Image (cartoon, helix red, strand yellow):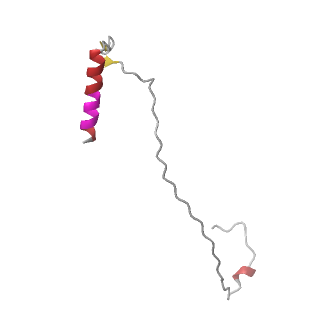
Amino acid sequence: MLVCQLREMIDNSKEWAKQRGLLQRNEVHGKEEWKIPTDRTFSFENKNTQSSSATGSMTVQDPMRLSDIPFSSQCKM
C-alpha cells in the first residue's frame, strides 16, 4: 500500500512539473528529472506526555551481616 502511495505521489509531482515546464532530460544519464519546490515549509506538533511520581520505603534484614564486609573496587556488579 505504501509503495502505491509513493508511486502516486511521484507521478503527481511529475505531472505537476510537466504542466509548469519544469521537466527536463538529464544530459548525463538520459533520465527525466523534474524540479519541485523545496523551499516551502510546514510544521506540526503532536505532544503526548505522561508523568508520574512515586515514593516508597523498604526494610531489609541482613542475618548474615553481609553489610559488614568491606566493598572491594575489584568486584564486578
Side of 70 relative to 56 (left or right): right
The N terminus, quarter of image: top left
Q: Tell me which segment is drawn in magenta.
A: 4-10
The C terminus, quarter of image: bottom right
* Residue ranking furthest to the bottom: 63
Side of 76 relative to 19 (left or right): right
Magenta stretch, overall SS: helix
Q: Is residue 18 above or below residue 4?
A: above
Q: Residue at x 68, y 85 (%)?
A: 62
Queried whether the magenta region covers residue 34, the answer comes back as no
Residue 5 location in percent, x, y?
26, 36
Q: Is residue 47 above or below residue 52?
A: above
Q: Which residue is drawn at 75% across and 75% down?
A: 70
Residue 8 location in percent, x, y?
25, 31
* Figure quadrant of residue 35: top left
Q: Which residue is drawn at 49% across and 49% down?
A: 47
